Amino acid sequence: MAYIDSKRIERVIKFDKTVFKEIRDDKDALMQAVIVLIIASVLGYIWGLGPFVVVMVIAAPLAWLVYTAVLFVIAKLFGGKATYTGYLKVLGYAEAPMALGIIPVLGGLVGGIWSLILAIYATRDAHEISMGKAKSDVMIPAVIAVVLALLFSALMIGMMGAYRPPGY
């Protein structure tokens, strides 16, 4: 049975220098990371989820698997040493601050930035690469995702602006 180690989560959010390698190498940490991820995701998005909490319990781990795979490939190109499973564990724990989304207005933004910074440190420590490579690893997909989201939003706005109801 997996349990949540609150001291370990505290060490993660305080950027403890040894915690990510410890998590990476802990054979029992995968289920713990999944639990941290799901709890943080549900709490972080509770205001917008309503009846879709069950969807989040499924979507968050799936997104985590894909996100980790993308970052894993990039980290390996930079000479990263972690296994995919080890990297899953550290990135799962790095999502803990997303729970701040339970605080209306700025909680989600603060939690998202904090989690992004933790992902950089987790990448550096788990893969044993430089901080510059870890920043590039995490930020390249993040920037691409933001650019794609902005392009998609612009496309949707353009399509809505071009729509004319019949008889208009």
Image (tube, rainbow, N blue to C red):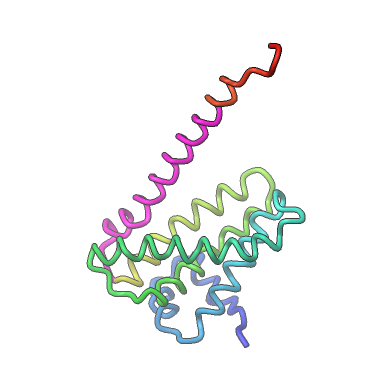
Tell me what residue is drawn at x 50 percent, y 79 percent. Answer: 30
Image position of 165 (left or right of 83): right
Q: Is residue 62 in the magenta section?
A: no
Q: Nearer the viewer, residue 62 or 21?
A: 62
Residue 13, image x, y percentages: 51, 65
Q: Nearer the viewer, residue 9 or 161?
A: 161
Q: Which of 120 and 18 is in front in this view?
A: 120
Tell me what residue is drawn at x 67 percent, y 60 percent. Answer: 55
Q: What stretch is highlighted in magenta?
A: 128-157
Tell me what residue is drawn at x 58 percent, y 79 percent. Answer: 5
> In the figure, residue 144 lies in which quadrant?
top left
Image position of 101 (left or right of 74): right
Image position of 114 (left or right of 107): left
> In the figure, residue 87 lies in which quadrant?
bottom left
For the stretch drawn in magenta, what is the main secondary structure?
helix
In the rendered image, the quadrant that contains the N terminus is: bottom right
Q: Is residue 161 above or below residue 14?
A: above
Residue 33, image x, y percentages: 53, 74
Tell me what residue is drawn at x 41 percent, y 49 percent. Answer: 142
